[in-house]
Amino acid sequence: MLFDSELHLSGMSGTLDHVMLRVEDLDESLDWYTTHLDYEEKGRWEAETFTNVYLGPEDLHEDGAVLELTYNHGDHTYEMGDAWGHIAVRVPEGELEDAYQQLMDEGVEDYRDPESCGGRYAFVKDPDGHEVEIVQRNQGATWSLDHTMIRVEDADQALGFWTRKFEYEHTGRWESDTFANYFMKPKDAAEEAMAVELTYNYDGRTYEMGDAWGHLAVRADDLDDYWESLMEREAEDYRDPASCDDRYAFTKDPDGHEIEILPSDFESPE
């Protein structure tokens, strides 16, 4: 992943690289993720007005995603909104109850236990209120990022965006009486790669973006070529590479979720 040359291997262009959350107390958030999810620091970017810290499990897969915590220096508070849903982390099949109980024993708040979720998953919250789902998977490191859920107002439009702009395809779907979930990844992505989960509620509701969530980041083999393809496919020209010192770029999905494009060899500035 970012800042570590040993992790810049042959990840497929378009793989999700990280998800960014904003936090109000960096030390408290770092302590929560390193203590309860056994995350370690993968990289850090200290700027004049903010700090970014990248976290993940010790044995993170080469195509696995990391968590970016952004701390803006000074006294800042954030609105959660409801356009972003949650991040999901993995535990092995059959270990959900034990993993959740471990978190409870460590003092994590009891938000949605496995029993209330039909024994299939569970939820906790981090110190800033970001929801963290615990899912059962036999691939990827324990606690590694499985997916990031975002809410969309038009499922057809959102699915078209990810398939046409980014060449993602379905890796799973779940349709119920009131909502549908669609999981998307690049074609032939590793099982250990993070997916984006598109949640569509059938009742026509709208969402507030808030500012407690930042963006998803997609890894590109070549930033300029990838950006050119996005522009040819009529993605939003939000922040082009030139406006970002040719180091990264940003587009947005139809619902306004920001998506950063990073070159695979991205490194933090000195």
Image: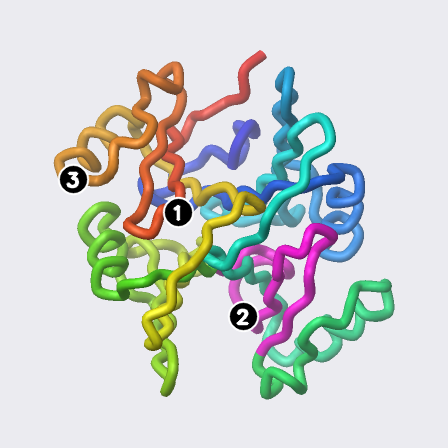
Judge whether 112 appears above or below 4 on screen.
Answer: below
Q: Earlier in the sequence, mark 2 or mark 1?
A: 2
At label 3, counting other C-alpha atoms closer than 10 Å, the crowd grade (few under 14, some 14-19, many 20 or more) is few
| Frontmost residue, 124 versus 135 | 124
User: What amino acid type should be assigned to the residue bearing mark 3?
Assistant: Glu
Mark 3 and mark 1 residues within 8 Å of each other at the beta carbon: no
The magenta span reads 121-147
**Callout in the foreground (2, 1):** 1
> Residue 171 at what x, y percent from top left?
33, 66
User: What amino acid type should be assigned to the residue bearing mark 2?
Assistant: Arg
Judge whether 236 appears above or below 256 on screen.
Answer: above
For label 3, the residue is 234
Residue at position x 59%, y 87% from top?
Answer: 118
Distance from disc 2 to disc 1, alpha carbons, whole Å, reads 27 Å
Judge whether 58 appears above or below 53 on screen.
Answer: below
For label 1, the residue is 257
Direction from residue 101 to residue 218 in the image, left or right: left
